Amino acid sequence: MKYLGQEFFIEKIKAKLIAKKFGTPAYCYSYSRLKENIENLQKNFKSFNPLFCFAVKSNTNKYLLNEISKFGFGADVVSMGELIRAISAGISPNKIVFSGVGKTAREIEYAINKKILLINAESKSEILQIEKIAKLKKKTINIGIRLNPNTDAKTLKEISTGKKENKFGVNEKTFLELVDYIKNSKNLNLKCLSAHIGSQILDHKPYLKMLNVLDKVIRKSNHKFEYVDLGGGMGIDYVHNNKKLNLKKYNSYIQKFLKVNSCKIIFEPGRSIIGDTAVLITNITYIKESDKKDFIILDAGMNDLMRPALYKAEHKIIPIVKKKIKSKKIYEFVGPICETTDKFLTIKNYQKLNENDLIVIYDVGAYGMSLSSNYNLRPKPIELLIHNSKIKIINKRQKLSELV
Ligand code: PLP
């Protein structure tokens, strides 16, 4: 994805032509970028051959899940819906892990029936629930326990999950009690310790802290874990200043950990696989001038891309055709939704924009379409996969008639 001359291209196709043919707003994914991201992660952690379970919550598109599975990926799911979607996209159940604090009895039973790799439990009550269902079915179920390592991931507080005040996982004391409890259970087989400290992590040090906590807790538990699931969280460069997570360092910490704890490592990456593969093409419906700034009113709103409204996430916005003339006003890019938080970015010194100009919102592949909604009864955008000069519709634009 880049400018060639003044025009923005997605792989080998002018974004302007895509908008003309398929309308806006449109999510456009680059297959080449997806492949690059997957191969990059696989290469960086090649020495210990981990199992990668793609975090389906970051992107639930069935076609994309199928493409990702072709690289040997499994899935990390957090609901029965995601589990059904992952299996129907061709992901093998024996590569699926089920996370989340509130799995219902129905969801647990479904996961057991599908013989997935692991149910990663997040509380004592959940473990008792799994045991009860397993007993009724006269089965022994492979489970993991999610440890809350009380580690600051140094990311947005809204996407931090590994501190003691967060609802995820159990603390060390409960973890150790549960390990002892499961040792005496006929229906539970404790195979995994899992952890996930947060998302959009760019500093490698929190991962080292997490591994040190895991190491200590494993020693105290005196249990041989077949799997250690390190979750996801690897961040991407939303601000485009070349700040990247140092995967070499992360890899070296894990190698050290593995010297003392022989086990299979599982990763649950979402954002680092799919985040920077997509842009959202949107049209400027109106420009509303006001005293201090101009509102650039787009045809994409917070219902199409929720991250800025949900946790003030910033996405780079660029015009589809570059021009030299600068605006003297501040621009505030907003959507059409009746909420004050329906805004994407406020920026100075931008190129002068006009109504009906097309623009592109960057890095929307993760938690973009999967967080979209029909708020204000607006149909969801189309999703397109671009590969070289080919365009494939991987999710049709929702019809208004389906909604009203
Ligand atoms: N695993 C778990 C348990 C999560 O909660 C999440 C995201 O919140 C992920 C994996 C994926 O994280 P990311 O998209 O940052 O890689």
Image (cartoon, rainbow, N blue to C red):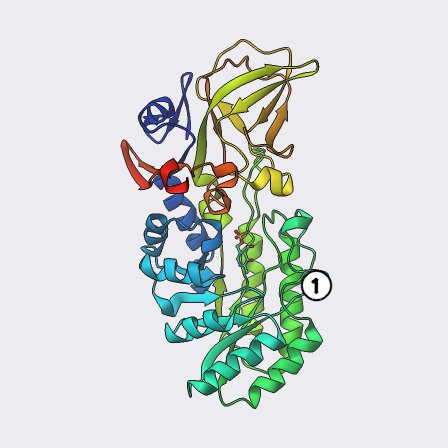
When the figure is inspected, residue 365 is found, relative to residue 360, above or below; the finding is below
Closer to the camera, 206 or 140? 140
Q: What's the residue type where badge 1 is placed?
A: Asn
The residue positioned farthest toward the front in the image shown: 404
Left or right? Give the position of 350 relative to 285. right
Closer to the camera, 390 or 110? 110
The residue positioned farthest toward the right in the image shown: 165
What residue is pinned by disc 1? 150
Q: Whole-percent x and y of residue 234?
A: 55, 51
Left or right? Give the position of 358 relative to 393. right
Q: Whole-percent x and y of residue 55?
A: 47, 56
Q: Where is the C terminus found, in terms of image quarters?
A: top left
Q: If the picture is divided into quarters, which one holds ligand 1? A: bottom right
Q: Which residue is pictured at 32% across the width and 53% down the height?
A: 66
Q: Is mark 1 on a helix, strand or loop?
A: loop
Closer to the camera, 59 or 107? 107
Q: Which residue is pictured at 60% across the width and 37% down the height?
A: 308
Structural crowding at the residue carrying mark 1, measured as other residues with C-alpha within 10 Å and reported as few (<14), some (14–19) or many (≥20): many
Q: Whole-percent x and y of residue 35?
A: 37, 45
Q: How many numbered marks, from 0 up?
A: 1
Q: Where is the N terminus found, in terms of image quarters?
A: top left
For the question of whether residue 92 can be seen, the reply is yes
When the figure is inspected, residue 29 is found, relative to residue 9, above or below; the finding is below
Closer to the camera, 63 or 152? 63
Q: Whole-percent x and y of residue 280?
A: 45, 33
For the question of whether residue 47 can be seen, the reply is no
Is the residue marked 1 within 8 Å of ligand 1, measured from its CB? no
